[in-house]
């Protein structure tokens, strides 16, 4: 496990804009802050305010979604 960790790409090795993050946060202020911080760090960011809108964004997106950032419990989700 240690050997695999030493060969993992460092953040500098990952091309800017090659990682897609789906941010699903119901509170507008937190979603705005999260998307802007991630975008400024070089991530491609998709955002949604609910479970239903996140599912629609994911359906429409043609590439991979590498990471999901979400509320612990979204209002229209199940926990």
Image (cartoon, helix red, strand yellow):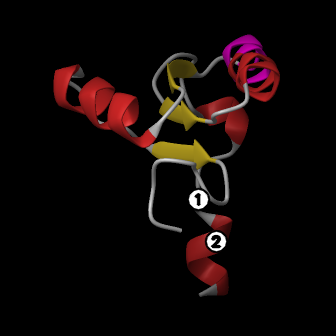
Look at the image and say whether residue 39 sits in the magenta stretch: yes
Please report the bounds of the magenta region as a residue range. 36-41
Give the left or right position of residue 37, taking residue 53 as reference: right
* Residue 61 screen position, x and y as percent: 24, 22
**Crowding near the residue tagged with mark 1, few <14, some 14–19, many ≥20 C-alpha atoms within 10 Å:** few
Where disc 2 sits, the SS reads: helix
Camera-side residue: 41 or 16?
41
* Residue 41 screen position, x and y as percent: 75, 20
Dot label at residue 8: 1
Can you tell which quarter of the image residue 56 is in?
top left
Give the left or right position of residue 11, taking residue 70 as reference: right
Whole-number angstrom distance, CA of label 2 to CA of label 1: 5 Å
* Residue 25 screen position, x and y as percent: 63, 36
Camera-side residue: 25 or 34?
25
Give the left or right position of residue 28, taking residue 63 as reference: right
Residue at the spot 59% in from the left edge and 59% down from the top edge: 8
Q: Which residue is mark 2?
A: 5
Can you tell which quarter of the image residue 27 is in?
top right
Residue at the spot 75% in from the left edge and 13% down from the top edge: 36
Camera-side residue: 40 or 58?
58
Question: Secondary structure of the magenta portion, mostly?
Answer: helix
Q: Are marks 2 and 1 in contact (CB under 8 Å)?
A: yes
* Image position of 28 with respect to 1: above or below: above
């Amino acid at each position: 496990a240690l050997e695999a960790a030493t060969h993992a790409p460092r953040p500098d090795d990952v091309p800017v804009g090659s990682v897609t993050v789906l941010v699903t946060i119901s509170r507008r202020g937190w979603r705005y802050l999260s998307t802007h911080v991630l975008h400024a760090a070089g991530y491609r960011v998709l955002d949604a305010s609910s479970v239903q809108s996140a599912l629609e964004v994911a359906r429409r997106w043609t590439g991979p979604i590498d990471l999901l950032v979400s509320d612990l419990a979204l209002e229209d989700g199940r926990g």
